[in-house]
């Protein structure tokens, strides 16, 4: 007599559970990598926006031999334009206590997960911040 009837279906259940686990690991890896890429992109956008805004110095003061400070309005506008054109949301400001020599850019970038969206996470927001500081060059 054969005992084939007692083992029927056991391999199929094991295979189904194993394949589900493999797909979950692959999906989480894809979402984890995507989220890290979005964070890296947000940091890059923030750094470039701060650099872009940091180039908007007050030319009248600098040419006249005075202090080299940022033109607040132009610097913030340049950085915010860069952020917007890069496809992100954010803001830029010249902090009041910086003496007009710093610009801080803040960026928010959304990542839409592949697998985690099935579990209710439709958007993961990445936040980054970068500061540009004017330096005196002798």
Image (spheres, grey):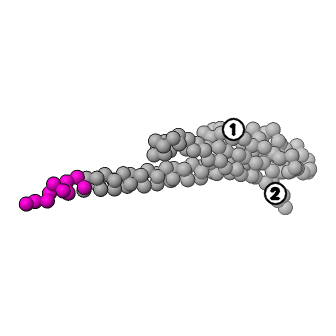
Does 3 appear in magenta?
Answer: yes
Circle on res. 126: none
Residue 52 at least partly seen:
no
Real-space Cα distance between discs 1 and 2? 23 Å
Q: Position of residue 59 (x, y in %)?
A: 84, 44
Does 14 appear in magenta?
Answer: no
Residue 23 at least partly seen:
yes
Q: Quadrant of residue 21?
A: bottom left
The residue at which mark 1 appears reads as 81
Determine whether the residue tagged by mark 1 lies in a helix, strand or loop: helix
Residue in the image at 75% along x and 43% along y: 92
Picture quarter with the N terminus:
bottom left
Residue in the image at 63% along x and 38% along y: 85
Residue in the image at 50% along x and 53% along y: 33
Left or right, 89 with reference to 124 = right
Q: Position of residue 116 (x, y in %)?
A: 49, 45
Categorize mark 2 by other alpha carbons within 10 Å: few (<14), some (14-19), many (20+): few
Q: Position of residue 106 (x, y in %)?
A: 71, 46
Determine whether the residue tagged by mark 2 lies in a helix, strand or loop: loop
Circle on res. 135: 2
Dot placed on the residue nearer the N-terminal end, 1 or 2: 1
Picture quarter with the C terminus:
bottom right
Left or right, 100 with reference to 43 = right
Using the image as rendered, state which of residue 85 and residue 33 is in the foreground.
Answer: 33
Specify the segment rendered in magenta: 1-10
Q: Position of residue 45 (x, y in %)?
A: 64, 47
Categorize mark 1 by other alpha carbons within 10 Å: few (<14), some (14-19), many (20+): some
Q: Are marks 1 and 2 in contact (CB under 8 Å)?
A: no
Left or right, 23 with reference to 41 = left
């Amino acid at each position: 007599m054969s005992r084939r009837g007692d083992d029927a279906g056991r391999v199929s259940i094991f295979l189904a559970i194993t394949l589900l686990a493999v797909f979950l690991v692959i999906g989480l890896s894809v979402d984890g990598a995507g989220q890290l890429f979005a964070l890296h992109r947000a940091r890059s956008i923030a750094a470039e926006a701060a650099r872009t805004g940091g180039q908007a110095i007050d030319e009248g003061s600098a040419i006249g031999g005075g202090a080299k400070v940022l033109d607040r309005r132009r610097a913030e506008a340049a950085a915010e334009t860069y952020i917007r054109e890069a496809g992100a949301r954010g803001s830029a400001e010249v902090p009041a206590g910086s003496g007009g020599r710093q610009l801080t850019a803040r960026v928010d970038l959304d990542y839409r997960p592949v697998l985690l969206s099935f579990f209710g996470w439709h958007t993961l927001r990445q936040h980054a911040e970068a500061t540009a500081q004017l330096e005196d060059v002798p």
